[in-house]
Structures are given as C-alpha cells and as structure tokens.
Amino acid sequence: MKSGSAADGSYGSSAYLVDDEGALLGFEQIGGVTGGRGVMGSSGAFTPEAVVGEEAAPTGATASGGQSIQLVDGVWTAAPATPDALPGDDGGDDGPGTPVPEDVTPIAAIQGPGDESPMQGKTVKTRGVVTASYPSGGLNGYYVQTPGTGGAEDETPGASDGVFVYSPGTVADISIGDHLELTGVVSEHYGQTQISVSTAGVTSLDEAAEAVKPVEDVFPDDAAAREALEGMLLQPGGELTVADNYSTNTYGEVVLATGDGTLSQPTDVARPGSAEAGALEAENLRREVVLDDGASVNYLENDKDVPLPYVSNDAPVRVGAQASITSPVVLGFDHEKWRFQPTTRLTGDNAEAIQPASFSDTRTEAPEDIGGQVSLASFNVLNYFTTTGDQLSGCSYYDDRDGNPITVRSGCQARGAANAESLERQEAKIVTAINKLDASVVSLMEIENSSVFGEDRDAALGTLVKRLNGAAGTQKWDFVSSPAEVPAEEDVIRTALIYQPAEVAPQGDSTILDDQDAFSNAREPLSQAFAPKDESGEAEADKTFVTISNHFKSKGSGDGPGNVDNGDGQGNSNADRVKQAKSLVEFAGEQQKTADSDFVYMLGDFNSYTQEDPMQVFYEAGFKDVASEKTDKSTYVYQSRTGSLDHVLALDDSASNGVDGASAFDAITGADIWNINSVEALALEYSRFNYNVSDLYAPDQFRASDHDPVVVGLFEPEDGGSDEASGSDDAAGSNDAGASADGSDSSGDSDGAGAGGGGTAASADGASSASSDGGTASSNGGTGSDAGGHLPRTGADPTLIMTIAAGLIALGAATVLVVRRRRLG
C-alpha cells in the first residue's frame, strides 16, 4: 500500500475490466477511502484507451502479509495466495481425475542433480520429516526432508534430500518433526523446487522416522554445491559477514557474505570495465546469501504492527559485523537469492527463541585516534532543512504507520523534515554525531540553501551551529560565512564548512567555484583557508591549509554524451563528474596560490568510487585519496556493495619536487572512516520514525545520515615532554628533513617531518637540540637519543661528531626553506 496526492488514503493496485469491443465495464482500486477520490487511469503501453482519464472506485479492501486480494462473487476478498488455482481451490493436484502414484519417490529423485527438478509438472508421492513450518507470514508451507539424512554423510551426492511443500490448506495443522506422506505436483517457484499439496494429499505416518540431522559445514560458494543442499536443514560454520541491512526495514532480511569481509563495490578497487572488476563482482555473487525471516511480508505496507526482526538498538546488526548461525536453518531459494530460513517465522517479538544468528557489535562511541594538532572531516547531513514541509504549500509526504507526515516526498522545494517534531529528531542525531566527531573543521553536504526560501543563505547553517553549541554547552562551533559573490543559480542544497574557533582560525574570506558549465547540475565547491592555533591561541600562519567542500552530481540520472549509464559500474553522469573534477583541480590551484600554501585538502561527497574516472583526474593532478591509503574502511553501502563515495583528497607533490615531508598528504597524522551511518539499519533513521510498531528511534549518532564521515589528523603536535626527550625526537626529525633536502632516502617518520608547516622551524629546533642532547646521550651510555645511539663506532669525540652533524642538519633545513613550492598547473 502506498499513499500520496494521487488518491485519498492508503491505496494499492487498481484493476479494470473491458469487453471485447474495448468498452470499460469496471475500474476499481485496492484500498483507499470508500466513496473518496480514487486514482486516475494514465496512458501506458498496455492501458486501454477507455481507462485513460477515468477515476477508479476505491474498494477499501486490504490484505495482511502473504495474502492476495481476489474478486470472488463480486466482493474483493483477502485470502492466502493460491498460485495455479482458482479462488476456492486450495491447489496442489491436477483435478479429480488425476491418478495417485503408487510408488514413493525419494526427495532426492524429485530434486535431481541440476538447477531444476526433472519431474516438473508431474504428480508425485514422497515422504519426509517436517523440518520447518510457516503457517503465517505468506510462505504458506513447510520444508520436509528424507528421514535420517543430513549430518556428515551424504548418500545422494549432488541431489538434495529436502524440499519445500506449498500447502496453504494444511500448514496450520502440521508440526515440526511430523512424519508425512505427501502427494502433489512438482514445480519451480522463483527457482526453488516445490511440491504443491492439497488437503487430501497429506497423510500423517505413525511409523517412527529416523531424525534429520543438520549439515554442519562451511557454507559453499559453489552454485552446484548449494543446489545439492536446497531445502535441507543446515548449521553453517565458517566465517560469515553482514553485507547489507537495507532491506531489513522492508522485508526482514539481512544479506550475508561468506568469508571475512564485506562485498566490495568493484569500481572502488578496480578500474571500471576491467577484467579485475568483473571478476570481483562474480566473486561477490558467489559469496552472497540472505539471512531471512521465514516470511514474504513487506513490513512497510502490510505488517507495520509486527515488530521487525534483526533490527535493534541494543543488539544492532551492522554491515561488516561477523555473523554466527546459532541454531539450524533451512536453505531456501527465492527471487534469485539463496536464503537461510529460520525454522518458523521470525519477528521482533519471538527473536529470543527463534532468531537463528548472533552478530558481533562493531559500534564505537568515537572515531579512532588519528593524532594531529588539528583535524578535518566530511559529514553528509541528510537533507537538513530548517524550512520544513508544513511551512510551504504543495508538499506531499512520507507518512508513518499512523498517517503522520515524517519527511517531504515531493511537490515543493523542501527536502527534509515534514514538521518541527521531525526536524527535532533529525537534529538530535546530527548534533550528537558531529559533536562526537569533534573535528576542527567539518565539510557539510546536503544542507539547506536558505536563500531559496527568501532567507539569508546561511540561515539553516547558523541554526545547526546554534544547536551544536547548545548541546556542547559552550560556543564550540562557528560557521564559514558565504562570500559576497555567490552563483546566480544554485541548488536547494549546498556545501558548507563549520569549525572550532579554539582550534583553527580562518585565513581570508571564503570562495565559491562559480563554474556553471561544470556545476549546473551539482553543488558548487566552497573553499576556506585555516591556520591551526598553538597552545596560546595564536594562529600559526606557516601551517595555513586550504579546505574545499564538495558535492558532485549523483549517479541516479544523466543525459548527454557520456552521461548515460553504460554498464561499467560508474552509473549516470560520469562525464559530468569528470568535468567537475577538472574544474575543481583548477580551482584548487588558484586557492593554493591565494593562500600561499601547499596544504590543500578537498573533502566531501564526490559521488565517485575510488577507482572511477573522476578520481583519476585528481590522482593525475597530484592528489591522494587519504582514506584508501590509510584505512580499510568505506563510507557507503549500495545494493549490498561497500565502497567510498566520500573522500578527503590531499595534495602530494613531494615525490615530484624531491622534498620529503612538505606535502599536504605527508602532513596527515592518521585517518579514519567512522562507520556510524552506512552500516546501520535504515529503520533507525529519523525518516523512518514510527514506520514500525517497534520504537527504534534514538537521539544518538547511529544512522544520522546515509554516508559515513571521513576524518583525518593534520600536523604532529609540539612535543610536550622533557627537554631531553624533545631534543631526541627533534634531532631525528631534523635529520630526516636534511636528508630529504639532499635528495637522499629518509628512514624517518614522514608524517612528523611534514608536521611543521614546511619543516623549517622543526629542522632548526632539531639542530639545536641535537647538539646538546646528543652529547648528553653519549655521556649517559648512548641511551635516550636516537642521534647519539646511532653514531658510528670510530672512537672519535662524540661531541665533535654531533656538532658537525648539527651543522649539516642546519644546512639541510636551510635547503628545505628555499625549495620553491610546486603549483598546480
């Protein structure tokens, strides 16, 4: 059922009846408000002309999960679906004249060794023990398995000993463990072999049956090996990883991957269209298996009042978590996917007793320690609009299960919360997440461009900062004001930058890249330079760094040459994103010159996976993708594939100009992707509030958005230890700087060498410290100083040697000072 402006109330499909001459005899609509407004017939390839422009009559008829709605004797009636049978017939045989087979056919013979049964369309008699039963939830049947089969031994290699029995008329009367004789017709239903059995086709056997044993083994990736287990009881061992939970909110299912690790987006690790990308996707398909709920219901439409399975704040099921099958499941196949089915329907109510799996808890309350004097991060705020739908006219909404509007659907320019209550829930999650992220500078995407609504362009941004400071209890945050010159035409969402004034100071004014040729269908990049503050609160101008906030065109649509999805994995609008990347590189070069700094960082949602064409533009221009270089995490999950659309790109020109430790990339002390959004169940999002009877909303950071934030640390902080320790560290760092300036190899810490805003001050300090501390270290037996400890064993006066070394280091530092910074072309 759906709702919207097309008709009154919640409604579903419509049905029409026309005669042989094309005249309309009837046009009725499922659901809706009886006597109210119905849907209008619209033109379509298969829609009769008589229906176009006519209004359907709402019937008010609805059905619960697993049922169909049938017109019986002029009345729309909800009842269990009966494939291949007319209303009133429970299905399962070929009619009263169909002969009943005399011989019992083993289940393995019915299944056969191939993908499909060799006995399709035939009436068979077989026997089996019931291993799983689904009297509710829409499956309307049960699994049976040949007595005594399973376990470690396989007497029918290549063929399964289990099968699904479709029998709506008998499923309520049988129990797990029953020994049955079944007579019915064999068919393939969405790729799964089944026997359709009527009430007359089931006989309960009194004779004892040897118990069925679950197959306890690593679940295979090979399709034939899986086919040989279809319908059988399993207790899978080996590693299983959660790969997707997006459909958990709708169908109560979780996608798993065999082995360790999620299913990688091919173009995140290999070039689009390459053999490597194709091989990776083939491997992904082999590894997939769905952990199901023993039902076919849609929780968003029919069973909103049934608690969702596999969704919880107390025991979250997150992408990347390890899954363990804790009780036997049956291997089913449906809608092109292999499925682990619990032995009866699972819901949130009976999870403690029925849920067949447990999951590791991978949540963290904060990002990993990334070090650094300051930090940068990107954060998608999920269409944060302070202009709510109820403030505008024409908006339609996505409603909760009680019909209350939650988010804007269409009809107006707002894209976020429907009203103040919904906005408050959205803000609570975003504010918690950003305050715990605690980065010095944060690039924001998908925030309202308030000028569209006749307000100051920064109005929504200012409101968010106010909420952040209110939660922090201090004036912790400020925002970068829009420049005086902004593009004449902009999207309703924009990029923005917020920062912590106690940690960084803006240098100069912000600038927007106004290139309508490249960014007419995307959000214009916003640039601002910052300088970190020292312990006294003074800005260190020699460490000025440039940040550029970005949000490229999405993959969802596109037109024109190179912008239509060609199937190589890059989606729509690839050519436009390449154009945007080239424009951004030129803009970054201009900002680099304006700020007189090589510390250039581009952050945000580039809507491009790591190896796609737009990213190659950045790599060729001398940028590195920080997260892929320093972490093994990803920012986004789409259709069970994990990859990064969000990036922090750092200029890395040290290799080309011979200077080690002088680039933006080398200034990075660490990086993390904080997996708080993409890996969490969609049901936890503010936009799904009260969609299900379970109370799943929490004002925490989890599922505050759909993209995960990337956070990086910059500049090694000044050493706060003793003079001796400080001298030792500085000496090592200075020696590295001098060696790099000479063009020789350096074995020191490049992050540390790049932390001083060019290395000059660090080298000078190191030279001074090395002379005195080196001598001290020598007199103390060579401990406490790398410089003293690594002197050559020549018998020469160590003080003299250290004095000479200090002079060489100072010379190297001077060389670093005069190296001309390479500019972006």
Image: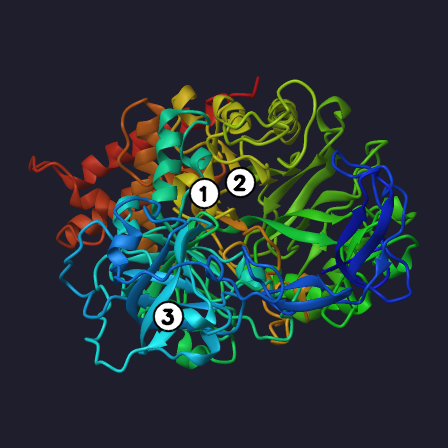
Report helix, strand or loop for mark 2: strand
Check if mark 1's residue and mark 2's residue have beta carbons within 8 Å: yes
Instruction: Tell me if mark 1 has few (under 14), some (14-19) or many (20+) residues whose alpha carbon lies within 10 angstroms of its own.
Output: many
Residue corresponding to mark 3: 358
- Residue 155 in the image: state x and y as whole percent: 14, 58
- Residue 451 in the image: state x and y as whole percent: 87, 45
Please indicate, yes or no, whether residue 436 appears anywhere in the rendered image: no
Could you tell me which quadrant the C terminus lies in?
Answer: top right
> On the picture, is 84 further left or further right than 34?
left
Q: Nearer the viewer, residue 788 or 108?
A: 108
Residue corresponding to mark 2: 647
Name the outermost residue toward the front. 97
Measure how far apart labels 1 and 2 are at the Cα level.
Answer: 7 Å
Measure how far apart labels 2 and 3 are at the Cα level.
Answer: 32 Å
Instruction: Tell me if mark 2 has few (under 14), some (14-19) or many (20+) residues whose alpha carbon lies within 10 angstroms of its own.
Output: many
Residue corresponding to mark 1: 627
> On the picture, is 551 further left or further right than 761?
right
Measure how far apart labels 3 and 1 are at the Cα level.
Answer: 30 Å
Please indicate, yes or no, whether residue 706 appears anywhere in the rendered image: yes
Q: Nearer the viewer, mark 3 or mark 1?
A: 3
- Residue 809 in the image: state x and y as whole percent: 32, 32
On screen, 185 above or below 738?
Answer: below
Which residue occupies 43% across, 36% down? Answer: 266
Colour scheme in use: rainbow
- Residue 801 in the image: state x and y as whole percent: 19, 35
**Residue 500: quarter of image:** bottom right
Q: Nearer the viewer, residue 728 or 677?
A: 677
Q: Identify residue type, mark 3.
A: Ser
Report helix, strand or loop for mark 1: helix
On screen, 669 above or below 207?
Answer: above
